Image (cartoon, grey):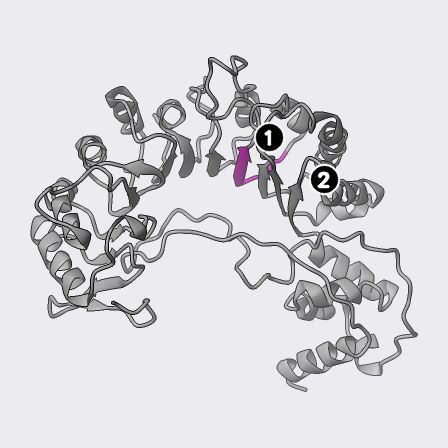
Amino acid sequence: MPSYLLHLQLENSISSLISRDCSVFSMSGSFSRYRPGTQVPHEPQRPSSSPPSNTFVSLNIPQVDILRPFSDSMTSQLPNETLFAILEHLQSNTLIPVLRVSRRFQAIAERILYANICIVETLPRSSPVPYATACCFKTLLDRPHLSEVVKRISIRWQTESGPREQYMPYVEPVLETMNRALRSLTALETLELAFGLSGGTISSRGILEGCSFPALRLFSLSGVGRGSLNPKTHPTPTPPIEWFLSETPSIQHLRLADCHETLELQPSDLPFLTTFRGSAPTAASVLPGRPVQLLSLVGHEFVTQRDLERIACSSARIRWLDLSSMSVTPILLRDISRHLFGVEYLKLKLALRHTLHHALSGISLLAGLTSVLGAFPELYQLDLSPTNIDAISPGNAAEEAQLCTTWARGCPSLRHIVFPSKIEWILNEQDMWIPQAGSPPSH
């Protein structure tokens, strides 16, 4: 029987036994398009808006309670490897009830579900306990055989603003459980922790002490320490993370969005680092001597010349520059071009309150970028989609086409442009700028 028919028959058979619904959580985002033949530093893919089958569902998965004897001759004769290959393509809302089909199906589906754990929790002050997180890590402790299958963990807590003291008594026991479970996950490849509690007393050492991740490739930590809060009102600095980075040389992708201090790293630390996301002061202390090619800066619109000089000391040329998480003025962009002139892919959010050209209005004021873009001799793609379109009139196809032509005169290497309207324009082989199919319609 063809494999696709077998897949369909098995899914239909499973669907006839189950009818429970459940919810999943996902995150997404990235650069849009690359020059043909160019390889972007690879990051483990995040779940798309259509969640994959191996995304953790924040439910308390029950022990096996067989719905009815499962004796279908077709599936009972299949080896576990074949069932695994089929079930891993199913959606999470199908896999959760599969746990109740039989003990054999539970063992297989459980390994798929726990390979990719993704939890998003809203923690209002009226209910500050992260129950889903606590349930997940307690399950990992109770079922130690699952530790070898967990490859990715992503935890995101959404908290209310204000003092953090009220949260601490409720989250600290959960973080202790998390630490105990993380110690056993030696096969982990991706760890993303966003606690949303900047200004609190959470310590990275309390979460990661005793952990060893020899296969870890992506590490992301935010929502701990002082973050971007005013040092005058929050004098306690962010707890050090250098000790963990030094003990985890396999890290290739590092995200420290809430770290605004310099890190004291040894030259031998993070030898394989290729992408970094964080503040300019932190980037200036991390990048020198390391092969970072993709840089994403966060924070304020002011970056010192000293930080830019240090950032430019990476051992590899920075080709991808993402400034979509900060407001970028033409002056800052000009300063960046003096140090990172080898950028090929530039994504930014313009601070349009700083008028680019006083004689122009609406989308036409973007023409003032021409001289700035000309300072990037290797620039291939310009992505302005993060720019707030409410700050300018949207313009029409003719105005956008004219801007493409104007910018290309100042920056001859430019081939791909994304406007704040999200419309993409590509320079074709006939040197004509063409809007891409599927882009939002021009006004």
Residue 238 is situated, as x and y percent measured from the top left of the image, at 53, 20
Q: Which disc number belongs to residue 130?
A: 2
Which element type, helix, strand or loop, lies under badge 1? Answer: loop
Name above or below for residue 215 compared with residue 52: above
Quadrant in the picture for the N terminus = bottom right
Q: Which disc number belongs to residue 197?
A: 1
Residue ID at (24%, 51%): 392
Residue in the foreground of this view, choosing between 145 and 159: 159
Q: Does the magenta run of residues contain 303? A: no
Q: Does the magenta run of residues contain 221? A: yes
Residue in the foreground of this view, choosing between 276 and 399: 399
Residue extending furthest bottom? 1
Answer with the quarter of the image where residue 396 lies. Answer: bottom left
Q: Inspect the image, locate mark 2, and give the three-letter code of the amino acid beneath it.
A: Pro
Quadrant in the picture for the C terminus = bottom left
Name above or below for residue 418 compared with residue 142: below
Residue 272 is situated, as x and y percent measured from the top left of the image, at 44, 35
The answer to whether any part of residue 210 appears in the image is no
Q: What's drawn in magenta, residue-wise?
A: 213-222
